[in-house]
Amino acid sequence: MAPLRFRVSDADTGARLDRVLAARPEVAARSLAERLIASEAVRVDGEVRPKSYRLTAGESITVELGGEPTLEAEELELPVAWEDEHLLVVDKPAGLVVHPAGGHRTGTLVHGVLALGAEGGDDDRPGIVHRLDRDTSGLLVVARSEEAHAALQRLIRERGVERRYLALVRGPVRSRTGKIDAPIGRDRVDRTRHSLDTATPRHAVTWFELVEELGPRALLEVRLETGRTHQIRVHLQAVDLPVCGDPVYGVGGDLGLGRQFLHAHRLCFLHPFTGAEIDVSSPLPADLAVALERARSEA
């Protein structure tokens, strides 16, 4: 299919990219516009832009309408920590992207959970109700039906799913417990990052508790109250507790780490259909366990 090309009109100056794209008859749906933008099938003057990008008259937009990947189940041997006929909890390894986007058209967690019966929600991310960054490991709950997806989304929205992480950070921890309440959005200067210095702030709250002091480092248990992009990493950097190994917001390469020391180690919620308490834990992966022992030896 030939690409769609058009220029931004004067009337659309200041409008969001996704809304202008959805208004085109060739697209005609906000959900399709968002999927096209997420899969980097849309360029503004040759550059990839987020869906919230504000357009300027005269900018050239190119859309590869045939660029959306077709989802097919893949046998990825994902570790399953808990499951029943309604939902499952998977233990995502580091390095695995949650859903297709950009250069990740196959081999994502979505492709793997499709083979495990994931259903519900958006066509391009069936079963998914929350996410982890590519290089963050740990637990995610996935729906196996439309009903389960809607129920889990409601639990997430009502803060009925407790998500706890282990994070190794640098810097003195000034209190044994703390709450970080600061809005997060795309950084004003670097659009690949999120920060507190943003024109698009969204409410974000993170709680932390000191688990172990390790000289210049500390092991924290972190609990999410909201789930913004890169929230834990951004919030901890903002209070001078950058995550070890994090090349973007923290201390890249610390302790020989090739990724951020951040692991979703516990997931707790009431089953939306049976009412049973689901409490699932995941041990530290080998690379983080080795780094933690190294931090202890250097303390």
Image: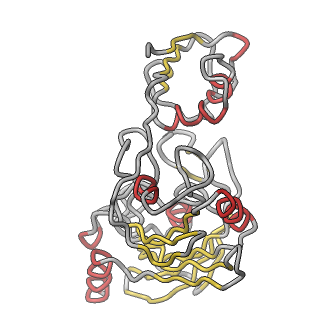
Q: Nearer the viewer, residue 164 or 87?
A: 87
Q: In this view, does 32 lie above or below 113?
A: above
Q: Which of 140 and 163 is in front in this view?
A: 140
Q: Where is residue 215 in the image (x, y as percent from the top left)?
A: 37, 86
Q: Could you tell me which quadrant the C terminus lies in?
A: bottom left
**Residue that lies at the very extreme toward the left in this rendered image:** 256
170 lies above or below 75: below
Q: Nearer the viewer, residue 170 or 77?
A: 77
Can you tell which quarter of the image residue 8 is in?
A: top right
Q: Measuring from the top left, give residue 183's x and y in whole percent.
A: 67, 56
Q: Which residue is at the front of the view, 268 or 10?
A: 268
User: Vertical placement of 240 versus 41: above or below?
Assistant: below
In the figure, residue 58 lies in which quadrant? top right
Q: In this view, does 292 lie to the left or right of 282?
A: left
Tag count: 0
Q: In which quarter of the image is residue 9?
A: top right
| Residue 175 visible in rendering | yes
Residue drawn at point x = 52 percent, y = 31 percent = 36
Q: At 55% from the left edge and 52% from the top edge, which residue is drawn?
A: 126
* Residue furthest to the front: 85
Q: Which residue is drawn at 66% across and 25% down?
A: 22
| Quadrant where the image shows the N terminus | top left
Residue at figure coordinates x 72%, y 81% from the top left: 275
Q: Where is residue 5 in the image (x, y as percent from the top left)?
A: 51, 12
